[in-house]
Image: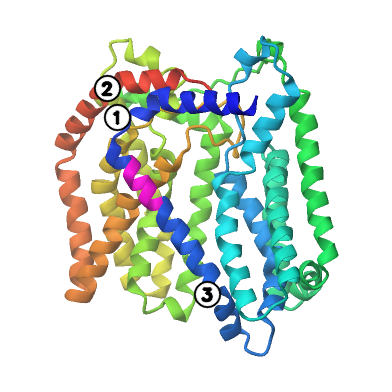
Amino acid sequence: MFEHFVNLQWKSFFRSSSFGKSLALKIVMICFGLCMIITVVFIGVFLYRILRNIFPQENPMWMLSQFMVYWVLIELFFRYFMQKLPVMDVKPLLSLPIKKSAITHYILGRSGISAYNLMALFLFVPYAVVLLYHDYPILNVGLWLVSVMALVLCINYVNFIVNKSDKALGFIGGLILMLYGLDYFHLLPVREFFGPVFHGLYQYPIMVLAPITLAALAYWINYRHLRNRIFLDASLKTKSKEAKTSNMAWTRRFGDMGTFLQLDLKMIWRNKRTKAQVFISLLFVFYGLIFYAQEIYATMVPMHVFLGIFMTGIFLTNFGQFIPAWDSSYYGMMMSQNIPLRKYLESKASLISVSVVVMFLLTIPYVYFGWNILAINFASALYNLGINIPVILYFGSFNKKRIELDKSPLGNMQGTSATQFLIILPVLGLPILLFTGLYFLISMEVAIATLGLLGVLGFAFKNRLLDRITEQYRIKKYGMLAGFKEKGG
């Protein structure tokens, strides 16, 4: 039966409309994955030496155990955003003589071999090999590795339990900040308290039973939860919601574009996922305090341009990378009407442009750390306005995954795939490489001026760029419509 499920998933993958993306993009994704694996393996190989150099008087295994509590919490926190819940189109199978338990076990079992779990394997297996090279007991190391992988599976299944709860996310994030604050200000020895617990997994091999039991318990809870909800009539129930109305008559002054602008503003205000993008963007204004306030980053000027592009363009990236998937539930209706596609894209560009300007104004107080930081942020904002907005709109034509905003709030990862992260390469990577090259080859003034000038040129050719992007959307129109019709993608 498992083989049959795998065969169905394989066919679904290759027959999906999103599979028709360019071969070059798939090659880039493969290369990106290989680079990630190589990086993680590299860290695992040299982790022992890194710990030995930082803590020369301590056992590296003991020091790693002290930081394991943060690793568990941070991985659980980031999996909330990054990891998709194990999904499978089970409705056609429910009318067939297939046991629901088999379907449930397959869904949960398939999630156990996800890329996130394999990344932990690539990290800790090389580290375990290095431990054996330094004459650590093979029994202790082997069972410790089993314990760590059991913890990874436990994190995997706990994430599925808490993934739909914003309160759980807030609790985990608050717990990380609280523990780190208590440890940093020496109010409570957090690492010394949890260190023996995780070190016991290595020191006492019998302790391997504890993480295995926790992983099995998390699996069983997920099994009971999922098994009791696999019913054919579950999708027939409808939810009634109170309608919300708001008057945005001021948007009419923008003409035809005002209709789309009003639609976007209502969408952002009425849905938790889009509203969260706004609050997250505002919170990242404080991201610069982490770097500007530390002397070690004072001379790292390329880091400053990263902060400038990132902070002024955070909403551009978070919101823009899902254009037009935000409108996927009614995109087909829009395309069947006599609606100017150019005005639609222009409204998106205008909305993002306002966000870039607002974010730049919020970063002006960072002039306290130097006028060069203000100049870099200003040039970065110009670059985002002139170059990155057309880039993000162009990549939006490759979006074929549906987003249903009424399904779940912040943790909803609908419409997200590795492709979304590839957009970061031209949006962040290109300006940083350009600035860094000019900074070291010529001067910082030339680098700043070039970045700002490119933004001005992009803004000057805005109409031509939007024309080309509009034509790209027309070419990809039917592929997007087919992809947006596929639910659960």
Q: Secondary structure at mark 1?
A: helix
Name the quadrant containing residue 218: top right
Most common SS among magenta residues: helix
Q: Which mark is residue 46?
A: 3
**Amino acid at pointer 1:** Leu
Label 1 to label 2: alpha-carbon separation: 6 Å
For residue 174: magenta?
Answer: no
Circles 1 and 2 in contact, beta carbons < 8 Å:
yes
In the rendered view, tell whether residue 270 sits above or below residue 317.
Answer: above
In the rendered view, tell whether residue 160 sits above or below residue 257.
Answer: below
For residue 30: magenta?
Answer: yes
Q: Secondary structure at mark 2?
A: helix
Q: Nearer the viewer, mark 1 or mark 3?
A: 3
**Amino acid at pointer 2:** Leu
Q: Residue at x 38, y 53 (%)?
A: 312
Q: Residue 481: x, y in percent?
A: 37, 18
Tell me the residue that label 1 is attached to: 345
Q: Which mark is residue 341?
A: 2
Q: Residue at x 22, y 32 (%)?
A: 469
Q: Residue 71: x, y in percent?
A: 65, 62
Read off the magenta span.
26-32
Q: Secondary structure at mark 3?
A: helix
